[in-house]
Image (tube, rainbow, N blue to C red):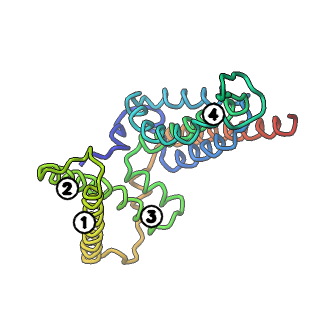
């Protein structure tokens, strides 16, 4: 099975070497700072920081393009009508079609924040293995139940996707035409969905019983193991803190600049 998010976690870059605990704090703070940007004056700075981060991470552009494709389709469907409906200042008009300045600026702002936040999230999860990221969440005090659910969900969503593809291939081999829209096809899709839900529930029960047989739920202290498995020497630890302080400074600067523009304008 191929993990889609962390397939480039073995690359060598400063962000790959950044301790995952500090990386989680720094990049998530940066994502929240991007989410607060409402002034279009800050858009170039936000995009510059995002592009620099992605360049430093050494992740290929194909990784970014493939992960932004489907969320981008959803975003396009949401914002496509904003230039025609939002605002009062008309910049172009042809018949009943009217493009408004405020709507265009809103589209630019939404797309820029979407790109910055999604790219930073891909950097966060793409530069460390998912298991290492989950361990970092535990070190930050997140509940083990939540991290276990996150790990299992990430692990078995690919398994369910594989089963769904197999079921769809089986229906096609039996003469099912996916291009046609009819009540019969809808009933087939409903049957496939129900079968997938039942199979996923049964597999979840089997996995849970197997985990119980292996002692899952017993209280034990593995903090020393986690710390020892992620220990760093003094220089690396110093670089981790430097990266964290830089990300926090950028985040605070964006928030302060946003408040400044908000008060002034």
In front of the other: 75 or 21? 75
Whether residue 120 is visible: no
Q: CA distance from mark 2 to mark 4?
A: 39 Å
Sequence-first disc among 1 and 3: 1
257 sits to left or right of 27? right
Q: Residues within 10 Å of mark 2 (few under 14, many from 20)?
A: some
Residue at the disc numbered 2: 167
Q: Nearer the viewer, mark 2 or mark 3?
A: 2
Q: Residues within 10 Å of mark 3 (few under 14, many from 20)?
A: few
Q: Quadrant of the C terminus?
A: top right
Residue at the disc numbered 1: 195
At 52% from the left and 37% from the top, the residue drawn is 76
At 15% from the left and 53% from the top, the residue drawn is 170
Q: Are marks 1 and 2 in contact (CB under 8 Å)?
A: yes
Mark count: 4
Q: Residue furthest right?
A: 264
- Seen in the picture, residue 144 relative to 251 is either above or below; the reply is below
Residue at the disc numbered 4: 107
Q: Residues within 10 Å of mark 4 (few under 14, many from 20)?
A: many
Sequence-first disc among 2 and 4: 4
- Seen in the picture, residue 153 relative to 178 is either above or below; the reply is below
Q: Residues within 10 Å of mark 1 (few under 14, many from 20)?
A: some
SS at circle 4: helix
SS at circle 3: helix
Q: CA distance from mark 1 to mark 3?
A: 41 Å
* Picture disc at residue 223: 3
SS at circle 2: helix
Sequence-first disc among 2 and 3: 2
Q: CA distance from mark 1 to mark 2?
A: 9 Å
């Amino acid at each position: 099975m191929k993990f889609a998010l962390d397939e480039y976690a073995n690359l060598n870059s400063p962000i790959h070497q950044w301790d995952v605990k500090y990386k989680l704090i720094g990049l998530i703070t940066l994502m929240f700072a991007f989410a607060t940007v409402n002034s279009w004056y800050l858009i170039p700075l936000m995009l510059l920081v995002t592009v620099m981060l992605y360049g430093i991470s050494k992740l290929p552009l194909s990784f970014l393009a493939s992960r932004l494709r489907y969320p981008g389709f959803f975003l396009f469907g949401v914002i496509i009508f904003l230039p025609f409906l939002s605002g009062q200042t008309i910049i172009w008009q042809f018949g009943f079609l009217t493009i408004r300045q405020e709507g265009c600026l809103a589209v630019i702002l939404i797309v820029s924040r979407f790109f910055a936040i999604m790219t930073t999230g891909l950097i966060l999860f793409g530069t460390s293995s998912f298991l290492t990221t989950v361990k970092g969440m535990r070190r930050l005090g997140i509940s083990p139940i939540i991290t276990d659910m996150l790990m299992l969900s990430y692990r078995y969503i690919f398994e369910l996707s594989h089963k769904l593809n197999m079921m769809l291939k089986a229906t096609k081999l039996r003469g099912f035409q996916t291009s046609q829209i009819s009540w019969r096809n809808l009933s087939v899709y409903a049957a496939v969905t129900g079968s997938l839900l039942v199979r996923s529930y049964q597999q979840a029960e089997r996995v849970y019983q197997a985990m119980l047989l292996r002692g899952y739920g017993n209280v034990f202290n593995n903090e020393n193991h986690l710390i020892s498995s992620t220990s760093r020497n003094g220089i690396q630890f110093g670089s981790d803190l430097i990266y964290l302080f830089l990300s926090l400074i950028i985040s605070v600067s964006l928030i302060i600049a946003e408040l400044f523009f908000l008060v002034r304008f």
